[in-house]
């Protein structure tokens, strides 16, 4: 692949990490993980969901690491778990860094199977930037993948 590709992802419980690593193997691209401080979410899924929904409602998104030199890339693949049908809040924070990036953007996501609204939410967060077709997988699809870990 002659295009320079960056994969940026967030993962709360490891599934999106597996998918990101698989994609990295295929595309030989650079991999960057989005991180939040340890006290941002809970170890409990329902509590984490509550915290994330509150972050969206208040507009107070979590602080994340800055990914430098986005403009060096032709394509950015952005990976997130699906939370309440939507893009997880650490990736919502990251997407603010994308600004007016003029390369290509595509998304990948993992879910428990209920992801109908995800793509539209992702596109909305990019304020009119063109989004290329992406892909979603379920946690079950990825749970037997040993080679990526
Ligand atoms: N899965 C769905 O299919 N639909 C959802 O709306 C959904 N909401 C979730 C909310 C929270 C806070 C969490 C922790 C999980 C949710 N899930 C949902 C399941 C995750 O999307 C799924 O397990 C995903 O693969 C986890 O990725 P990760 O291991 O990279 O965090």
Image (cartoon, grey):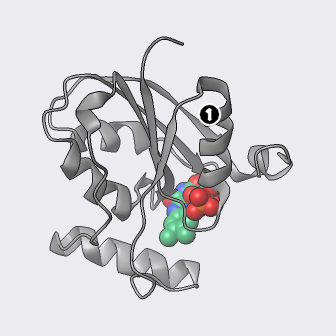
Between residue 124 and residue 89, name the one nearer to us: 89
- Can you say which quadrant of the picture contains the N terminus? top right
Reply above or below: 20 against 15. above
Q: Quadrant of ligand 1?
A: bottom right
Point out residue 54 in the picture as x, y percentages from the top left corner: 28, 78
Residue 139 seen from this side: yes
| Numbered disc 1: secondary structure | helix
Residue 112 seen from this side: no
Query: Number of numbered discs present?
Result: 1
Reply above or below: 74 against 110. above
* Location of residue 119 by image quarter: top left
Point out residue 146 in the picture as x, y percentages from the top left corner: 86, 48
Reply above or below: 105 against 149. above
Between residue 53 and residue 109, name the one nearer to us: 109
Q: Which residue is mark 1?
A: 23
* Location of residue 90 by image quarter: bottom left
Residue depicted at x 39% and y 82%? 40
Residue depicted at x 33% and y 72%? 53
Q: Is residue 12 left or right of residue 51?
A: right
Q: Is residue 38 left or right of residue 93?
A: right
Residue depicted at x 15% and y 37%? 127
């Amino acid at each position: 692949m002659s295009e320079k590709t960056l994969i940026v992802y967030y993962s709360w419980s490891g599934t999106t990490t597996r998918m990101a690593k698989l994609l990295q193997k295929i595309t030989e691209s650079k991999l960057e993980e989005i991180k939040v401080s340890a006290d941002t979410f809970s170890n409990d899924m329902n509590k984490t969901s509550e915290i994330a929904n509150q972050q969206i409602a208040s507009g107070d998104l979590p602080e994340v690491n800055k990914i430098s030199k986005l403009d060096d890339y032709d394509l950015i693949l952005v990976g997130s778990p699906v939370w309440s049908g939507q893009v997880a809040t650490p990736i919502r924070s990251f997407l603010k860094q994308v600004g007016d990036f003029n390369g290509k953007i595509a998304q990948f996501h993992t879910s428990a199977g209920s992801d109908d609204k995800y793509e539209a939410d992702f596109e909305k967060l990019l304020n009119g930037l063109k989004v290329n077709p992406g892909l979603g997988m379920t946690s079950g699809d990825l749970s037997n993948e040993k080679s990526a870990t």
